[in-house]
Image (spheres, rainbow, N blue to C red):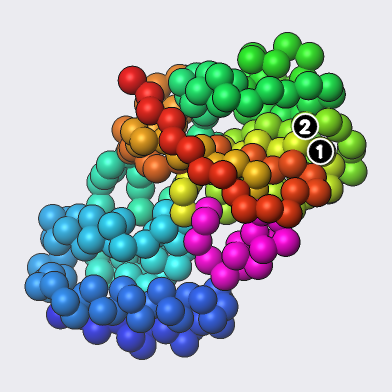
C-alpha cells in the first residue's frame, strides 16, 4: 500500500494545523482497509473515496487537502463522476440551488417581516418566495437575480432579516456578518455546521434560537433546476439578535 505520511508536512504548511489531523485520519483509513494502488485502478480509488465520504465533513472531502494528500496525478488515477461530485472539485462559488421544498418547509414554521436581504441569491430560488426582498450575489453570471458582483462580507447594509443558502466554506463568516447586518438570520446549511472548534466558539456567543433538521436528506439543484444526485443532511439555522438562551431543536419531515 502506498504510504502517504510524507505529504503531511507540506500540506500542514499549505493548509494549517487542522489539515494535519485530517491527514492522520486518512492514513488511519488507508491502513485499516486493503486498498491496492499499484495497478492504478479507478475501482480502488472509488472504494477509498467512498470510505472518505463517510468519514469526513464535505467541506474537507471536496477540498484540495484530500487531492493533495492522495496525489491523484502521481497515482495515475482519473476517477469519473461519483455520487454527483468530482473529488477535489466544488461547484464554482459553492453554488448549490436551494430546493423549493426546503424553503416552503421553513416558511411554514417561521415568519419574516420588514426589509429583507438574500445576499447569495443565485438564480432566485429563495428570492421568488419574497417578492420585495433585496437580492445580491458575488457572481456576475447572466442568471443571477438581483445585484451582481456584490461581496456580502464586504457590505455594511442594515436590514430586518437575512435569509440565504451560503457557500458552506463561508458559512461561519456569513453567519457572523449576517448577525451584524440583520435582526433575524436564517441560513440553510449542512448539519456539519454544528461541528468544529471555531464554530463552537461562535455558537457560545451567538446561539441559534432554533434549528430545524431535515429528517430526509436533501438534494440541492444545479443552475438548471436538476438534482445534483447527492443527498446531504441539511438544517435551517435561525438566529435572532440578542438571543442568549439554549437553541430549540425541531425536525422537518418532507415527502
Q: Nearer the viewer, residue 29 or 43?
A: 29
Q: Nearer the viewer, residue 27 or 217?
A: 217
Quadrant of the rendering where the C terminus is positioned: top left
Spot occupied by residue 17 in the image (x, y as percentages of width and height):
54, 81
Disc 2 residue crowd, few under 14, some 14–19, many 20+, Cα 10 Å: many
Location of residue 146 with respect to 9 vertically, above or below? above
- As drawn, which residue projects farthest toward the top? 131
Spot occupied by residue 71 in the image (x, y as percentages of width and height):
34, 70
Spot occupied by residue 44 in the image (x, y as percentages of width and height):
14, 61
- Name the dominant secondary structure of the magenta segment: helix
Left or right of 180 on screen, residue 35:
left
Location of residue 142 with respect to 170 vertically, above or below? above
Whether residue 94 can be seen here:
no
Check disc 2 and report the residue beneath it. 161
* Residue 194 included in the magenta stretch of the image: yes
Location of residue 233 with respect to 47 vertically, above or below? above
Question: What stretch of residues is rendered in magenta?
Answer: 193-207
Could you say whether the residue bearing mark 2 is in a helix, strand or loop?
strand
Give me the C-alpha separation between circle 1 and circle 2.
6 Å
Could you say whether the residue bearing mark 1 is in a helix, strand or loop?
strand
Left or right of 107 on screen, residue 120:
right
Check disc 1 and report the residue beneath it. 183
Q: Residue at x 89, y 38 (%)?
A: 157
Quadrant of the rendering where the N terminus is positioned: bottom left
Q: Do the residues bearing badges 1 and 2 touch, measured as CB atoms within 8 Å?
A: yes
Q: Quadrant of residue 139?
A: top right
Disc 1 residue crowd, few under 14, some 14–19, many 20+, Cα 10 Å: some
Amino acid at each position: 500500500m502506498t504510504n502517504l505520511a510524507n505529504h503531511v508536512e507540506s500540506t500542514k504548511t499549505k493548509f494549517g494545523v487542522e489539515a494535519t489531523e485530517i491527514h492522520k485520519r486518512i492514513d488511519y483509513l488507508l491502513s485499516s482497509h486493503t486498498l491496492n494502488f499499484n495497478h492504478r485502478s479507478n475501482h480502488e480509488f472509488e472504494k477509498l473515496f467512498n470510505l472518505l465520504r463517510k468519514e469526513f465533513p464535505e467541506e474537507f472531502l471536496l477540498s484540495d487537502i484530500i487531492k493533495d494528500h492522495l496525489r491523484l496525478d502521481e497515482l495515475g488515477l482519473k476517477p469519473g463522476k461519483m455520487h454527483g461530485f468530482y473529488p477535489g472539485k466544488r461547484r464554482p462559488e459553492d453554488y448549490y440551488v436551494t430546493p423549493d421544498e426546503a424553503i416552503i418547509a421553513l416558511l411554514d414554521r417561521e415568519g419574516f417581516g420588514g426589509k429583507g436581504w438574500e445576499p447569495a441569491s443565485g438564480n432566485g430560488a429563495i428570492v421568488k418566495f419574497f417578492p420585495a426582498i433585496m437580492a445580491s450575489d458575488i457572481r456576475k453570471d447572466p442568471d443571477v437575480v438581483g445585484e451582481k458582483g456584490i461581496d456580502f462580507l464586504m457590505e455594511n447594509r442594515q436590514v430586518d432579516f437575512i435569509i440565504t443558502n451560503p457557500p458552506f466554506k463561508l458559512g461561519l463568516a456569513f453567519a457572523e456578518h449576517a448577525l451584524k447586518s440583520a435582526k433575524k438570520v436564517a441560513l440553510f446549511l449542512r448539519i456539519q455546521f454544528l461541528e468544529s472548534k471555531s464554530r463552537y466558539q461562535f455558537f457560545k456567543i451567538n446561539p441559534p434560537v432554533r434549528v430545524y433538521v431535515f429528517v430526509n436528506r436533501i438534494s440541492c439543484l444545479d443552475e438548471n433546476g436538476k438534482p445534483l444526485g447527492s443527498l446531504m443532511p441539511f438544517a435551517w439555522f435561525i438566529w435572532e439578535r440578542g438571543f442568549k438562551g439554549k437553541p430549540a431543536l425541531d425536525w422537518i419531515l418532507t415527502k
